[in-house]
Image (cartoon, grey):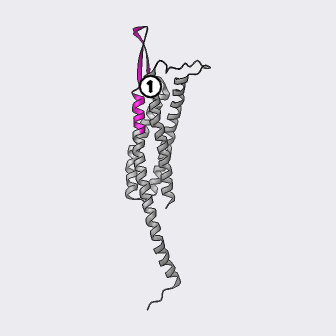
């Protein structure tokens, strides 16, 4: 008969009791990794649609004769150009980050790659939020104008242009919200280690 010491008995008990917790942590991390992948796909759709919608926005109005026309394009304002570039960069980043996101589904214990992903996600969140916020300010001025600075509301004349630039903001702000969720989920997955 072999006598088991108290230390060995405690070690055996902690191994057997921590085993279900370790399995539940791995399962939760796998679920978080799958949610991360799905949210990245949603963000790709939102930011890419915003970039395309803003980048293809233009409207031409005749003025007195058919030879004199007013034209509104996204390139007329640098803020809109920055918005298109920011959304395109974030979309490209999201496509590239899908590889690491899929890697986290397969290997839920990876920490270094998750830390790198959180860092770049935060940078892209800032870029996207700055572009969307600056564009939202210009869209507000386009709809309402500002009497003090003699900025007239152009949306009464350029209806189609204003509808498209307003609609492109929706996808971008959806991307901002999704990025916040992705960063939170990644933080939770890292804290569960």
Of the pair 66 and 143, the residue shown nearer to us? 143
Of the pair 45 and 84, the residue shown nearer to us? 45
Q: Is 67 within the magenta?
A: yes
Q: Which residue is mark 1?
A: 74
Work out whether 57 lies above or below 87. Answer: above
Dividing the image into 4 quarters, which one contains the N terminus? Answer: bottom left
Helix, strand or loop at disc 1? helix
Write the residue at 46% across / 51% down: 116
**What span is in magenta?**
46-75
Q: Give the residue at the far right of this rendering.
A: 148
How many tags in the picture? 1
Question: Residue 49: where, in percent of width, then height?
Answer: 40, 35
Write the residue at 55% across / 18% down: 152
Residue 154 is at least partly visible in this image: yes
Q: Is 190 within the magenta?
A: no
Residue 93 is at least partly visible in this image: no
Q: Give the residue at the far bottom of this rendering.
A: 1
Question: Residue 100: where, in percent of width, then height?
Answer: 40, 51
Write the residue at 52% across / 24% down: 143
Question: Residue 12: where, in percent of width, then height?
Answer: 47, 78
Write the residue at 43% across / 28% down: 164
């Amino acid at each position: 008969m072999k006598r088991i010491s108290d230390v060995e008995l405690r070690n055996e008990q902690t191994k057997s009791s921590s085993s279900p917790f370790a399995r539940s942590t791995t399962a939760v991390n796998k679920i978080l990794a799958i949610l991360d992948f799905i949210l990245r796909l949603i963000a790709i759709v939102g930011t890419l649609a915003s970039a395309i919608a803003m980048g293809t926005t233009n409207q031409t109005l005749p003025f007195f004769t058919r030879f004199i026309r007013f034209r509104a394009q996204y390139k007329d304002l640098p803020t809109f150009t920055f918005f298109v570039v920011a959304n395109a960069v974030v979309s490209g980043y999201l496509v590239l980050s899908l590889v690491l996101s899929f890697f986290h589904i397969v290997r839920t214990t990876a920490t270094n790659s998750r830390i790198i992903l959180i860092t770049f996600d935060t940078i892209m969140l800032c870029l996207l939020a700055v572009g969307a916020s600056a564009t939202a300010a210009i869209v507000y001025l386009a709809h309402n104008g500002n009497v003090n600075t003699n900025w007239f509301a152009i949306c009464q004349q350029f209806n189609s242009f204003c509808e498209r630039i307003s609609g492109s903001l929706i996808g971008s702000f959806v991307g901002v919200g999704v990025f916040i969720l992705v960063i939170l989920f990644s933080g939770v997955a890292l804290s569960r280690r």
